[in-house]
Image: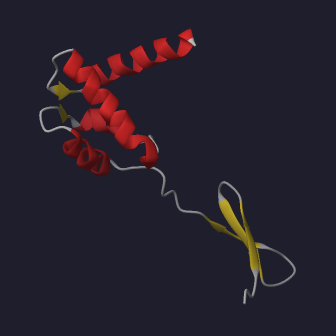
Amino acid sequence: MPVDYGYRDSTYFWYSKSKRPLKCPIPDVQSNSVASVRYASERIDPSVKFTDEACAMLVKVPRVFLKTVLNGCVKYAKEHNITLIDEKVMKDINDKRKAEKSKK
């Protein structure tokens, strides 16, 4: 049987055992670290490698979409005969994506 009830918004979880609700900050579990992006990128395709700078550009990608983004980067690299994705290649991929998005 629940003793108290709570409400969660985008940054806090609000709960109340008394008259005035209290708030607890929600930890940011959605953002990745460079190490977690590197771990995921190493398992996508062994022939295409990512630098730490390229992985740092993907830190803000939600974990749910990280595999899809990495697959897209590997596909771009294979189309252009690239074996090492660095910051310059990531900028090219982002520019291509922005151009495709603006056409829609």
Name the image quarter holding residue 102: top right
Residue 101: x, y in percent?
Answer: 52, 17
State how many labels appear.
Answer: 0
Residue located at (72% from left, 90% from top): 1
Front in this rendered view, residue 2 or 16: 2
Task: Identify the residue at horizontal 44%, vertical 40% (top origin).
Answer: 61
Rendered image coloring scheme: secondary structure
> Quick one: which residue is furthest to the right in this view?
19
- Rendered position, 100 above or below 74: above
Q: Name the residue rendered at 65%, 57% in the picture.
A: 11
Query: Could you tell me if residue 58 is visible in this image?
Result: no
Q: In the image, is 41 to the left or to the right of 68?
A: left
The image quadrant of residue 55 is top left
34 shown above or below 22: above
User: Measured from the top left, where is residue 54 in percent x and y?
Assistant: 28, 32
Say if 75 sits above or below 68 in the image: above
Relative height, residue 6 to residue 104 (above, below): below
Query: Toward the viewer: 64 or 85?
Result: 64
Quarter of the image with the C terminus is top right
Residue found at x 31% / y 33%: 71
Q: Is residue 74 rendered to the left or right of residue 24?
A: left
Please identify the quarter of the rendering in which residue 10 is found: bottom right
Q: Nearer the viewer, residue 104 or 84?
A: 104
Would residue 56 be found to the left or right of residue 65 on screen? left
Q: Position of residue 58 (x, y in %)?
A: 37, 37
Would you say residue 78 is visible in this rendering? yes
Where in the figure is residue 41, as x and y percent of width and height? 25, 42
